[in-house]
Amino acid sequence: MLKKKTIKKTAETEITFEFAQPGIKSVSLVAEFNQWQPVTMKYHKKENAFRTKVKLPGDKAFHFRYLLDETTWENDHNADDYVPNPYGSDNSVVYTKIKK
């Protein structure tokens, strides 16, 4: 799931990335904005979900995926878009449109 908050003062968008699936022990956010290096998402027991927040430049598109238990790739089922990647699957896309 993606939640977006526009920060007009800095022309950025704060994106909350959230992933929930029973039985998963770890989730990492892997994206072009972090040079495709896994960033461990924090587990929130009350919501039974993994979550992280990232501030990104506005009016851009960013590709990302989730890495589950360091072995399985998954897309965000609520992504703004999906595009093919060179590995025969799709990347999730998030748009950071600034609200005017």
Image (cartoon, rainbow, N blue to C red):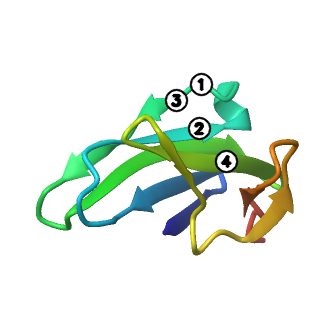
Q: Are marks 1 and 4 in contact (CB under 8 Å)?
A: no
Callout 4, which amino acid? Phe
Q: Do the residues labelled 1 and 3 touch (CB within 8 Å)?
A: yes
Left or right of 13: which side holds 87? right
Q: Name the residue under label 1.
A: 37
Vertical arrangement, residue 83 with respect to residue 63, above or below: below
Q: Mark 4 points at which residue?
A: 64
Callout 2, which amino acid? Val
Callout 1, which amino acid? Gln
In percent of width and height, residue 27 lies at 39, 44
Q: Name the residue under label 2.
A: 30
The mark nearer the N terminus, 3 or 2, is: 2
Q: Residue at x 11, y 64 (%)?
A: 46
Cα distance between the residues tagged 3 and 2: 5 Å
Q: Mark 3 points at which residue?
A: 38
- The C terminus lies in quadrant: bottom right
The crowd level at tag 1 (other Cα within 10 Å; few <14, some 14-19, many 20+) is few
In percent of width and height, residue 20 lies at 34, 65
The crowd level at tag 2 (other Cα within 10 Å; few <14, some 14-19, many 20+) is some
Q: Are marks 2 and 1 in contact (CB under 8 Å)?
A: yes
Q: Is mark 2 on a helix, strand or loop?
A: strand
Q: Do the residues labelled 3 and 2 touch (CB within 8 Å)?
A: yes
Left or right of 42: which side holds 55? right
The mark nearer the N terminus, 2 or 1, is: 2
The crowd level at tag 4 (other Cα within 10 Å; few <14, some 14-19, many 20+) is many
Cα distance between the residues tagged 4 and 2: 6 Å
Q: Are marks 3 and 4 in contact (CB under 8 Å)?
A: no
Vertical arrangement, residue 99 with respect to residue 72, above or below: below
Q: Residue at x 65, y 69 (%)?
A: 79
Cα distance between the residues tagged 1 and 3: 4 Å
